[in-house]
Amino acid sequence: QVQLVESGGGLVQAGGSLRLSCAASGSFFSSNVMGWYRQAPGKQRELVATIGSGGSTNYAESVKGRFTISRDNAKNTVYLQMNSLKPEDTAVYSCNFFARRLGKNYDYWGQGTQVTVSS
């Protein structure tokens, strides 16, 4: 079982920055992928960025060049630095932990944190 605790959301003006953090605790495999997803009102949840335990990253096109995902494996924490925020970035941001071992998927979600960007 993995528990994910997010922090860092809030209200910011367009062009501003926020940093989200997600701390993982519990029992989990060292080989995993952690990431951030977001869901805006009336829209489906979408991938923002992911990072593997080896450091490989993947970003949505809409955030490339503005957001940076990173992780501290010693602290089991993943970060999302969000710069040049736009009103369309407004959403609930959720942290995800995924691992696959012996044919079984381990997929956990945080409770979500609200990010609101005002114009």
Image: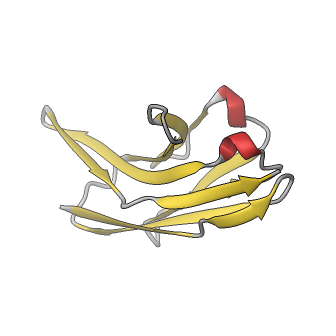
What is the count of numbered marks?
Answer: 0
Q: Quadrant of the N terminus?
A: bottom left
Residue for point 83% across, 52% down: 14
Q: Can you give x and y, in whole percent of width and height, for residue 64 in the image? A: 73, 35
Q: Can you give x and y, in whole percent of width and height, for residue 3 in the image? A: 28, 66
- Based on the displayed image, in which of its 4 quarters is residue 4 positioned? bottom left
Q: Is residue 1 left or right of residue 117?
A: left
Please state which of residues 80 and 32 is positioned toward the viewer in this rendering.
80
User: For the view shown, which residue lies furthest in the right direction?
Assistant: 15
Q: Does residue 80 appear anywhere in the picture? A: no
Colour style of the rendered protein structure? secondary structure
Residue for point 86% across, 53% down: 15
Residue for point 79% across, 38% down: 65
Q: Is residue 65 left or right of residue 10?
A: right
Please state which of residues 99 and 44 is positioned toward the viewer in this rendering.
44
In the rendered image of this protein, does residue 116 appear above or below residue 91? below
Q: Is residue 10 left or right of residue 14?
A: left
Q: Can you give x and y, in whole percent of width and height, for residue 47 in the image? A: 51, 35
Q: Does residue 19 appear anywhere in the picture? A: yes
Q: Can you give x and y, in whole percent of width and height, for residue 119 in the image? A: 83, 50
In the rendered image of this protein, does residue 100 appear above or below residue 36? above
Q: Is residue 54 left or right of residue 60?
A: left
Please state which of residues 96 and 14 is positioned toward the viewer in this rendering.
14
Residue for point 83% across, 59% down: 16
In the rendered image of this protein, does residue 10 appear above or below residue 36? below
